Image (cartoon, rainbow, N blue to C red):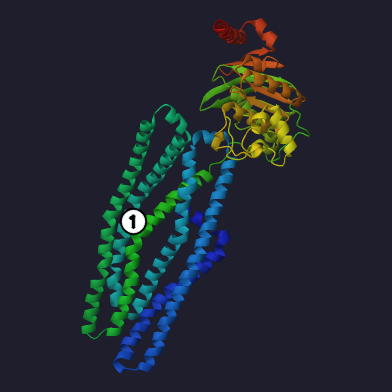
Amino acid sequence: MDIIKRLAGMLAPYKKRVFLALSLQLLVILSGLIAPFITKDIINLVIPSLDLGMLAPLCGWLLLLVAIRSVSTYSRSLILERVSQNLVYDLRTGLYQHLQELPYGFFDKFRIGEILSRMTSDIEGVRNLIAGGMVTVFNNLLNFVGALIFLSFMSWELTLSLLIFAPIIGVVAWQFNKRIRPVFRDIREQNAVLNTRTTEDLSGMRVVKAFAREKHESERFSKENLRLLELNLKATWIWSDFVPLMEFLSGLCTPVMLLVGGILLVQGNLDLGTLIAVNGYVWLIINPMRALSGIINMVAQAVTSAEKLFYYMDFGSEIKEPEQPKTPEKFEGHVVFDHVTFSYGGEDVLKDISFEALPGQTIAVMGATGTGKSTLVTLLGRFYDIQKGSIKVDGIDIREQALKPLRRSLGYVMQETFLFSDTLTDNIRFGRPDAEMEKVERAAQVAQAKEFIGKMPHGYETIVGERGVGLSGGQKQRVSIARAVLTEPSILIMDDSTSAVDMETEYEIQQELKEVLKGRTTFIIAHRISSVKNADQILVLDDGRIAERGTHHELLAKKGIYYGMVQDQYRDFEKYAAGKAGEA
């Protein structure tokens, strides 16, 4: 009932239209309830007297009722369909906007295929309830109650004979709902699992083909699809157990009515016209009984879908905006980490991190895989909240700052390069959609992307494929660098942003960035020594802690972890150079 109440609350903006639709449906119901009365008069008054003068107006009234019923049904259907489509729009838009506000942690927990399932099939389940289910419930309920009222005025004996079946049908319906709802919940969950499997497989199809694993992935898909089939069949078996019983119980109403009505007719306590009119009302009582299992089935599916939707919509963000946010007068890029500890999944990823980055400085972060390098820079935008310590940007704790201005002051070149299925121009100016073309081209020049863009079929207006398909890894990274540079951030974060770029191009990018980054703070995460050796400060992480810090020359003198990295890289380079010399 809580879910139904909540759905009803979402209909509040459309209450006038819903009220009009239900009023029209009420006309449909009343026209059906009045028709048997007219039939009774035709049989009792017109046929015995053969009064054709009385027949014409009575038939006219029947035709009028048919016209009212047809027009009202058409208008009601049109109104409710528009309301349901608008509600779906509101639901989908609201859910999408809510997802935009959720932190990284939510998307670490829930898979994209599952989220897509909620935004498509589950929302459609709710729409079906509004478009057809609401009217079906309203129609059957009022027909049942109205027919009983009208029938009671005609013959209380026949009314009581039919009411005997109502408690039995009610118990059967309750048992049906009790068994079917958990199955529908499992079906929805399995739909989400199957959508996730499909999304992942299609996104990773190049990897699947590269390793010739088509058969393996087909088997995994078939396994999940078979599970969905089994659940749907289970729902079908439950349905097949209850529907015949409901049909049998509701079907008994007609012979019982004819038996009781026939006895009353023979005894002279009922006339033929009333008996025929009663038969019309019996069908108005039987049909809701027969439809009860279908109504429960539809409502159970819709409620199950709504439960999942509301679960997502109620999923509050762990990252809370401050009630009275503070914003620096000017973002200059002064960053202070003060004894920062961050845990994820119950495990400390960063431990007691402290350092300062002055405006205009370049801070390099190095370390083995899994030491927390990317996590450290992610915390700057408050995409996760720290457990201990504080992070200040331009003198204000980031937990006291408004999120959007803080994040707009940052320029991210992420480790996993993501490009939208759009033009190169729009990908570059994603952070500044109003940027002039001249600035777009300048950002591309800085990122050494201008040359290859010029060779594309339509230049900057070339549409790249999904996730940047059609571009090499290095080209995608250069577009990503251009996108970040264009925003003119006070803090630029480059997370392994040139790993797919050759060393010559990387050098040219570094030279271009020198001018662009004057007065801006830069964080560089890299594995190449060439990328970090000119940094003002190099932080070497080990097991989530800062194991070493200093300039390139200072760390070399310590002959510690950083020194070992340099030795390894240059040893590899010397071997490579020696091999090339041998070939020559």
In the image, what residue occupies the spot 24% across and 72% down?
Answer: 256
In the image, what residue occupies the spot 58% across and 59% down?
Answer: 13
Q: Position of residue 208 (x, y in %)?
A: 43, 30
Q: Position of residue 203 (x, y in %)?
A: 48, 35
Residue lying at the far front of the rendered structure: 584
Q: Position of residue 355 (x, y in %)?
A: 68, 19
Quadrant of the image for the C terminus?
A: top right
Number of numbered markers: 1
Query: Residue 566, located in which quarter of the rendered image?
Result: top right
In the drawing, does residue 79 fall left or right of residue 274? right
Residue 7 appears in the figure: yes
Return the residue nearer the eye: 538 or 266: 538
Quadrant of the image for the N terminus?
A: bottom left
Return the residue nearer the eye: 313 or 425: 425
Which SS class for mark 1?
Answer: helix
* Number of residues whose C-alpha sits closer than 10 Å to that of mark 1, classed few (under 14), some (14–19) or many (20 or more): few
Residue 318, relative to residue 377: is it above or below?
Answer: below
Q: Which residue is mark 1?
A: 174
Query: Residue 287, located in which quarter of the rendered image?
Result: bottom left
Query: Residue 138, located in which quarter of the rendered image?
Result: bottom left
Residue type indicated by callout 1: Trp
In the image, what residue occupies the spot 42% across and 73% down?
Answer: 29
Q: Position of residue 444 (x, y in %)?
A: 69, 31
Residue 9 appears in the figure: no
In the drawing, does residue 510 fall left or right of residue 16? right
In the image, what residue occupies the spot 51% across and 58% down?
Answer: 84
